[in-house]
């Protein structure tokens, strides 16, 4: 539970005004660094839980 609280605090304190979400994405990547992740051309961050396919992709 402590990890979730710290993660939520890090995400909400990161500057993320529209068009300037890089700080938020960098915070998220700290927590998913051991997982497969990718960003698309409009800065969506996708994290894969398990095998890399559509059903295992989580959107941030």
Image (cartoon, grey):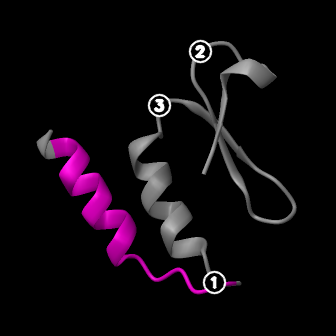
Magenta extent: 3-18
Residue farthest to the right, as pictured: 41
Which residue is under mark 1?
20
Q: Looking at the picture, how far across and down is residue 18, in whole percent?
A: 66, 84
Quadrant assignment, res 36: top right
Q: In this orientation, which residue lies closer to the viewer: 35 or 3?
A: 3
First-in-chain label (1 vs 3): 1
Q: In this orientation, which residue lies closer to the viewer: 1 or 45?
A: 1
Q: Residue at x 55, y 62 (%)?
A: 25
Q: Secondary structure at mark 2?
A: loop
Which residue is under mark 3?
34
Q: Which quarter of the figure is the N terminus placed in?
A: top left
Task: For marks 2 and 3, give the one nearer the viewer.
Answer: 2
Mark linked to residue 42 = none
Which residue is under mark 2?
50
Q: Looking at the picture, how far across and down is residue 24, in whole percent?
A: 50, 68
Q: Secondary structure at mark 1?
A: loop
């Amino acid at each position: 539970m402590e990890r979730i609280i710290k993660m939520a605090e890090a995400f909400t304190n990161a500057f993320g005004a529209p068009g300037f979400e890089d700080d938020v994405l960098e915070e998220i990547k700290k927590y998913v660094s051991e997982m497969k992740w990718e960003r698309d051309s409009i800065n969506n961050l996708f994290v894969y839980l398990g095998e890399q396919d559509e059903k295992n992709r989580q959107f941030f």
